[in-house]
Image: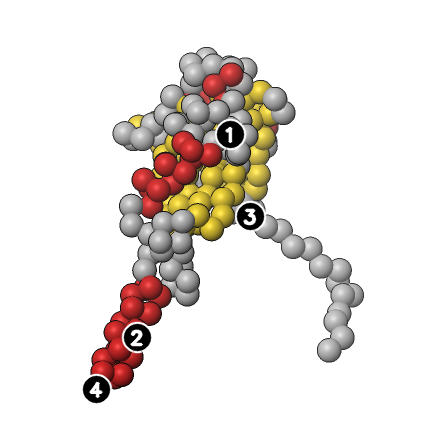
Amino acid sequence: IRNATLLGLTLVLFMQMAMAQAENPLQIADEYLRANFTKLELTQQDVSDYVLSSKAVSKHNRLTHVYLQQTYNDIPVFNAILNLNIKGDGSMLGVGNRFTSDLANKVNTTSPQISPKAAVEAVRGYFRLGQETQLQLRRETEEGDYIFEHRGLAREPIKVKLMFQPIEETVRLAWNVDFYEPTAQHWYITRVDALTGDILDYYDQIIHCEFDEHAFCHL
């Protein structure tokens, strides 16, 4: 009976360990960053300005994955994500860092000089999208998104939001314009310089594949 009891307790402890996941992962992440920012080649301010992007727990190993979005004056930095993989006991398995180092000294401004509407017009002009229909602002969200009416212009509402765009050793304030053009051939995510209206960067969410008409494969 004693052996059976010990075996039962061992199994319970094993199951608890297997099912364990980090408690208060955001606090653990914050404490880790404040203690290790120099190892990550960041400043103390860099690890003080961020928001939670997402959090998930892996079923097979119970790791807690925390993804943090870098910000400055509550404005996000494009593609600046830092992820931490936290074990069930609260220790750190690994860290992936895409934060911009010394961000405060690289930002050019926090005040846009062109409007969200002007940014959308810049995108329409750059990609030669139809400009016959006038833009109309539908609403502004509490999160700072500007939503423009899309009927006659795009397949989805046109979304515009302030964002920082890192370019070499500088970080420029930009309008991020989400525009799904009406033919469904392109879905442009574009950063427009918030001072000049220049296109800083973009990518197309629609993937195009082209195949040679004589292409074949061997099995």
Q: Residue at x 29, y 45 (%)?
A: 24
Q: What's the CA distance linking mark 2 and mark 4? A: 15 Å
Of callouts 1 and 2, which one flags the residue occurring earlier in the amino acid sequence?
Answer: 2
Please, what is the three-letter code of the amino acid marked with disc 1? Thr
Question: Is disc 1 surrounded by few (<14), some (14 to 19) or many (20+) residues within 10 Å?
Answer: few
Is residue 158 visible to the viewer in this orientation of the structure? no
The residue tagged 1 is: 38
Of callouts 2 and 4, which one flags the residue occurring earlier in the amino acid sequence?
Answer: 4
Of callouts 2 and 3, which one flags the residue occurring earlier in the amino acid sequence?
Answer: 2
The residue tagged 3 is: 206
Q: What's the CA distance linking mark 4 and mark 3? A: 65 Å
Q: Which type of secondary structure does the marked residue at label 1 adopt? A: loop
Q: Quadrant of residue 199?
A: top right
Q: Which circle marks residue 169 in the picture?
A: none
Question: Is disc 4 surrounded by few (<14), some (14 to 19) or many (20+) residues within 10 Å?
Answer: few
Please, what is the three-letter code of the amino acid marked with disc 4? Ile
Of callouts 4 and 3, which one flags the residue occurring earlier in the amino acid sequence?
Answer: 4
The residue tagged 4 is: 1
Please, what is the three-letter code of the amino acid marked with disc 2? Leu
